[in-house]
Amino acid sequence: MKVSITREYAWEMGHSLMHHKGKCYNVHGHNYKLELEVSGEVDSVDGMVWDFGLLDKTVKPLIEEQLDHKFLYNKEDTRFHSSQIDGTTAFDKEPTAENLALWIWEILIGYFQIITRSLQVESVTIYETDKSWATVRGS
């Protein structure tokens, strides 16, 4: 029987949405949260779907190296093309919660297919605020 486990991760990050007609066009930031749900069979020996520590070793470097205390912007946004500031990252799309969730989903799906075929990503939820989030779910 398949069982799911969920782990949360948090970081601070700035962004700007070049196509937004309101306040989100401006440079601003959020306290982001990732809620990752994975599933698999419970191991008969250790009683786990997967060790949370191993999950951390997979997810934390992604967050710490790519997102935490960074500034993300759409690579087509000419306002930031000459930016030589450390910690800025050109993103392929608008750096919305929806696109971040899809980006993390694709990375983790690929990673788990390489290291363990028994673990499936069920959902990736990105909280931009306590009241606003986007979720990608498996089909």
Image (cartoon, grey):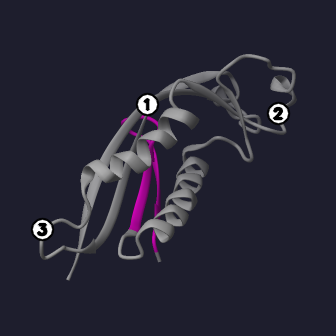
Q: Which residues are the magenta region?
A: 121-138
Label 1 environment density (alpha carbons within 10 Å; few <14, some 14–19, many ≥20): some
Q: Earlier in the sequence, mark 1 or mark 3?
A: 1
Between 43 and 20, which is closer to the camera in this rendering?
A: 43
Rendered residue at 13%/76% (across/down): 44
User: Which residue matches tag 1?
Assistant: 11
Residue 76 relative to residue 65: left or right: right
- Residue at label 3? 47
Q: Which residue is at the far bottom?
A: 1
Q: Quadrant of residue 1?
A: bottom left
User: Is residue 129 in the magenta section?
Assistant: yes
Identify the residue position indicated by label 2 in the image.
77
Front position in the image: 72 or 133: 72
Residue 2, quarter of the rendered image? bottom left
Where residue 76 appears, as percent x and y from the top left, is 84, 39
Give the percent coordinates (x, y) of residue 84.
79, 17
